[in-house]
Image (cartoon, rainbow, N blue to C red):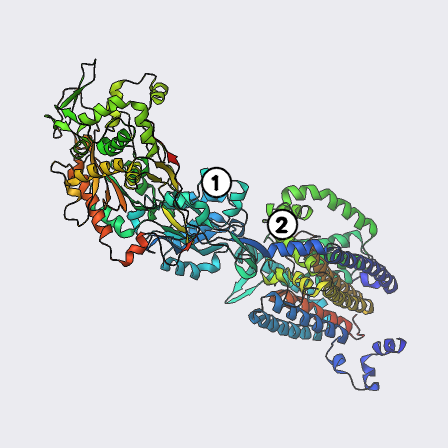
Amino acid sequence: MASRDYMHRLPDAGSSLRRPESFSRRWHIDLPLLLLLILLAGVGLVVLYSASGEESHYVKRQAVFMALAFVGMFIAAQIPLEFYRRWSPWFYLGGCCLLVAVLFFGVGAKGAQRWLQIGGFRFQPSEALKLAVPIAVAAYLHKRSLPPSFMTVVGALVIIAIPAALIVRQPDLGTSILIAASGIFALYLSGLSWKMIGSAVVMALMAAWPMWIWGLRDYQKQRILTLFNPDADRLGAGWNIFQSKAAIGSGGWDGKGYMQGTQSQLDFLPESHTDFIIAVLAEEWGMRGALFLLALYLLIIARGIYISFMAQHVFGRLLAGSITLTFFVYVFVNIGMVTGLLPVVGVPLPLVSHGGTSVITLMAGFGILMAISTERRRVLF
Amino acid sequence: MSENLRFKDHHTEQRLFRNRMLVAIFGVVVLLGVLVARFYNLQVVNFEDYRTQSDQNRIQVRPVPPTRGLIYDRNGEMLADNRPSYTLSVVRERVKDLDATIELLGRIVRLEDSDVEKFKRRLQRRRPFEPVPLRYRLSEDEIARISVNEFHLPGVSVEAELVRYYPESKLFAHSVGYVGRINDRELSGFTEEDVRRYRGTQSIGKVGLERSYEDLLLGEVGYENVETNARGRVLRVLERQDPKPGAELTLHLDTRLQQVATEALGDNRGAVVAIDVKTGGVLAFVSQPSYDPNLFVTGISFRDYSALRDSLDVPLFNRVVQGQYPPGSTLKPMMGLGGLAAGIIRADTKVPDPGFYKLPNDSRIYRDWKRWGHGKHVDLIEGLAQSCDVYFWDMAHRWGIDGMHDIATRFGLGEKTGIDLPREYPGLFPSRAWKRGARGVPWFPGDSLNAVLGQGFVLATPLQLAVMTATIANRGTHYRPQMVMAIDGVEQPPEVLHHVDARPEHWDLVFEGMEAVVYGIHGTGKKAGAGLDFKVAGKTGTAQVVGIAQGEKYDSEALKERHRDHALFVAFAPADDPQIAVSVLVENGEGGGSVAAPVARELFFDWMSRPLEDTASRQGGRPPMISAGFRHPHPHEVAIRG
């Protein structure tokens, strides 16, 4: 460990002293993370094939997205961290402008307005903010002395609140919360005092009641109520949860076998290839499969935390920590919702659910993690 | 460079970050633990429950309706068939927005408001996840259009169903009857067992044989466990218990004879019944006018129904078993036999007929239908041949109502014949007790004079008259009339209800009198035997529809057509070896001899001129049938009171 640490800390000038650079070092690849992601993506495609009723169309599409996402990750890994930090205000402002544009010119479906149409291309600006917000907050905190002063915290909260509020308006509560969480994680990791965290929690609890009355739409309230009494409305709001619990539960320890899940194959499971895909895996592969997937996620998160520990300066540290913890939130919220622990909010299961943009954003985030992990000691100041 | 950076303490910052991260790691581990615990709870602790739920989800027990038993005539001609019909059905549980779905369906197929209305009513009493019919009788074109649009119509299905079809249409509406959709009233009368038996079955016998043999025709419901997907579409059958089809009925009815009778009646309203003398089997059963029973099978339209219901000709009315008419003089042969058996009259009893009759101590004059009478020496044979009223008045006066009531009952008058058809009416043959009970007045001698002529209180259905005639033709063996000859190929034995006991010479005398009706010089029913190479024995009758006041002259021209007398004729043939007995009623036909007798002649001609190979079936012995211990008539010896 000590020797590796030494190697790691060698200045550029010393490179000629070592054996020729490995591929991964030269191209800023974090090999353990890459292998874990490839494994996860592979599992995702296999489950998706079953979940989409053996229709290879979905799987092919998803494979193309995955390939694009790995390319995106690779590119994101090549960019020096300093570039992200310096340009963070512009990413952030650009993202917010796009969000404003969505409010005016956005297109959408099912009552939500989330996309911008440019030519034949549809683009969801809130995805970009998933990265822009933690980068902006980390860069903002990077410049200040830590633990943050009260004014610094207020500043960070403003940075978080503006895009979160714009996304709530679309409306897209799920994404908004995830984006806010990514910013708050950076703030939390920077050393936000427990006193402030405590008072924020108290305020949040106090705000819960007015939020319930004025903040939530009826369907959102319904979803929360369903959580507490899923059998009340089996054919309505409770249908999804009833069916996904039946799918998971009937899988047992061993599972019903690949492509043998009756719940998913007979269409009882709603959205089986998108948000509820974990139920397909749990039904067909059983608890063994579910534990395997959770282990895979745990290893990725552990690697992310390791990278954040090894980061050389505040910006990288906060950003790596934020990206990793947000990734965990994705996993937890999705599985929590499918297993009936949390209300149903549209959060996909990272790298397994069908869907293009989320894969690309996630992989870009992992690219940044790799950039952090392979960042050599540079003179930043 | 920012001011702040100068004071940055990298070590403190790093320690701070590590502390925070350690807390976060703790949080991550705890929450992952929660997820693992959740999977454990769902997949291990509650595995059995969820497996059951998942199975219940996908496996449905579906009833498999049995095919309804077919109905054939005696020659194997199909009278009630099952044909596939395609029904548009909706499973409420699988449909998100019912109104939108109906709206969309309305653009794909023709949907009347009444269809939607009936559908909504059916929805309220359905079982969960049961397809509820929305439109019946889809055309090929409509089926194609629905299957093209199937993709956006979850919960909507097209189901093939066997539906009753009556190929002979009007011809057997009153005998075979029809089935119709089970209605609320029938449903509320269902026992638990009925509810089970009718699972999956939409229709039930409403009238006719379809109703009286409902239990046999229905069959036994089967079941299958099917795996369905979330939209209710059946993907495979896991297990199946086949339904048992309903019993096949073979009737005594003969399609050709039925046709002959119908054509002979022409446009007249009326009824014709022909009975196989040897078994009591009903060979022809005509109630005119008739209607198309197919209209009722999947629900008759309001317009069609009100047309049938409001018609002055009452086509829905089953004249054969529900029409209660005064039988008129058709009772005379039976009364003659009764009088002979009771010793009231003898072969040589002669009565002078001056054209009227007076009861002792009564000034009222009873006029014979023939103004100048039938002569000085009318005996039984002439009394029958010319339908002499005075002869029978004389007998009735001496005999009294009790004896007449007794003999009428033996021949099946005044009570239901017991035919295997529903809603039969009993008719009426009065007695002292009846009159006191129903009218609150005693029996008058004049009432007996009316009764012997089949007037006054006397009412009989055309079926009862046919049974009476068959009983005479049998020389006293009174069979229960039967529509069904065999069930599932097993022959149904004839059933003797009574035996009317009289001496052979009494029967001979009555036969002679009835032959004289057809062949006598003054016979009233000559048209019944015209051109036949066998002998016919019969009796004409005329039944007053409107009472004619005493002393008034009957003027048919002045009466509205519907107030004219009904024409009646009963007969059997051949007279020396009776095989077929017939009763004919023509409403407002006036002349029994002129209008009703020719109808009977057509029947006799057709039945007796069948080629020899038909004789076997005429005897009720179809080759493929298994005889179920043919019970020979075991008559109760019935003595007639003297």
The CA span between labels 1 and 2 is 34 Å
Chain bearing mark 2: A
- Mark carried by residue B187: 1
| Quadrant, the C terminus of chain A | bottom right
Locate residue B581: give its quadrant.
top left
Q: Residues within 10 Å of mark 2 (few under 14, many from 20)?
A: many
Give the residue pinned by disc 2. A238
Question: Could you confirm whether marks 1 and 2 are on the same chain?
Answer: no
- Across and down, in percent, residue B297 comes to 37, 47
Q: Is residue B16 left or right of residue B341?
A: right
In front: A82, or B3?
A82
Farthest residue, direction right: A2
Residue at 29 percent across and 51 percent down: it is: B255
Chain bearing mark 1: B
Amino acid type for the residue under numbered disc 1: Leu
Does residue B405 show up?
Answer: yes
Is residue A283 positioned above or below B296 on the image? below
- Across and down, in percent, residue A216 comes to 63, 46
The residue mark sitting in front, 1 or 2, is 1
Q: How many marks?
A: 2
Q: Is residue A8 left or right of residue B598?
A: right
In front: A311, or B332?
B332
